[in-house]
Image: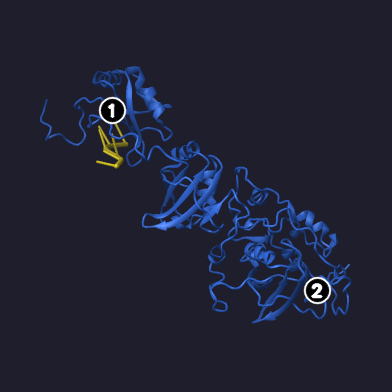
Chain colours: A blue, B yellow
Amino acid sequence: MSSVSSQPQFRLTQPPSKVLHLRNLPWECTEEELVELGKPFGKVVNTKCNVGPNRNQAFIEFADLNQAIAMISYYASSSEPAQVRGKTVYLQYSNRQEIVNNKTTADVGGNVLLVTIEGADARLVSIDVLHLVFSAFGFVHKITTFEKTAGFQALVQFSDAETASSAKNALDGRNIPSYLLPEHLGPCTLRITYSAHTDLSVKFQSHRSRDYTNANLPVAPSAIDANGMFSVGLDGKKLEPESNVLLASIENMQYAVTLDVLHMVFSSFGPVQKIAMFDKNGGLQALIQYPDVQTAVVAKEALEGHCIYDGGFCKLHLSYSRHSDLSIKVNNDRSRDYTIPNTVMMNPQPSILGQQPVATHGPPAHPYPGAHFAPTTEHHQMMPQPSAGWATGGGPPVPHSMPAQMNHNPYLPPGTMPPQMGHGIMMQMPSHGDLLPHAPAMPPYRPDHRQ
DNA sequence: AGCACA
């Protein structure tokens, strides 16, 4: 045969090899399909798929050179080209004599995938989108994300290696569907390998890590501060001492935020004992007192940074107050002590609803709605979630907790209920999360609307 | 539509 050294890169005729190189394979191509393709011609002893920059190439290694020759010869003269799932596959002898290392450790995977998100906007991909994408293959237990020199990466933990493998096979090299991404984002490609991890350690629910098996996991302060909405030092202290009293400041107050609205919002986490509202620095602030620190912590974690109304209106910023017991001198439209029954006392502008005593009306079915983590995107079928706290977090599924609660709200007789608030308070808090999903066309609550 | 992996 002719001299090897002068061969062009792609030769029309190549020295036979028991290894065949295949190209133009479909994405879904599996090892099994390669075996099927080669089986008529001999014993396939090894394969390698997902090769090449587009991962649409593969190798088949036969036990015997003659078998490889038989396959090449057959398709060289066949009127029907070799096909995998109807897609024409091009065959030639490989320039290697054997497939090396087909089953590397990278191919015998575990239940945890290492996902690298490529693309200019990769780091803008939310953990919720990743969760959505990978949930298509099975229940995603945990996700952690991090940035390394390799870029934006995530570890995605499935219950078993099989599920992880199916996700890897289907998603590796694919782009995240654009409809799952914010419009302005460019393509984000997933590169997936197996991680050596088997069980990720997720200590907090945060913007970088999630444990979908544990809805009660505390929310990391970092998740709250992540949006830069609450930079570190109000008072210089890195960690504010927790308190049963929250200080709420309300940003972008396009709509009236009343005592009753606050009461309703904060009552979702436990009984609100007292509320005092006041103006400060031109904005509205309020102190909300719970009976215990824990409740306040939960409320703060869940509510921080979220908006009472859709559209970014009335965004809540929460910190711990130094108070532990508010002194409410008078019940009016700015302050109230809910622990004192029949406190209609001097009410210069009595709220319509002011007569009710302790307002420990039922909190939602779950104390922590977890709605923080509701993906903003439209959910097609989500995987079933392990706990009620997560199940309704996303999208269209009708929130369940609030309507019932609303009906029992002693402060809002049915007639005065702004319709917008009938939807699940707390149930939709994605990145632009709002406690009340629909922006009111008018202030949602107006004290002068008496019956 | 053109040769991987460690």
Q: Which amino acid does label 2 sit on?
A: Asp
Q: Mark 1 lies on which chain?
A: A
Residue A7 lies, in percent from the top left, at 15, 34
Residue A48 lies, in percent from the top left, at 34, 33
**Left or right: A396, with A131 as reference point:** right
Which labelled disc corresponds to residue A20?
A: 1
Which labelled disc corresponds to residue A337?
A: 2
Label 1 in the same subunit as label 2:
yes
Res. A299 image quadrant: bottom right
Are there few (<14), some (14-19), or many (20+) residues within 10 Å of tag 2? many
Q: Mark 2 lies on which chain?
A: A
Are there few (<14), some (14-19), or many (20+) residues within 10 Å of tag 1? many
Is residue A22 shown above or below A148?
above
The residue depicted at 47 percent of the width and 41 percent of the height is A111
Which labelled disc corresponds to residue A105?
A: none
Judge by depth and name the residue closer to the eye, A174 or A107: A107
Is residue A122 shown above or below A295?
above
Judge by depth and name the residue closer to the eye, A226 or A433: A226
Question: Would you say residue A80 is visible in this rendering?
Answer: no
Is residue A351 shown above or below A99?
below
Look at the image and tell me in which quarter the C terminus of chain A lies: bottom right
The secondary element bearing badge 1 is classed as: strand
Q: Which amino acid does label 1 sit on?
A: Leu
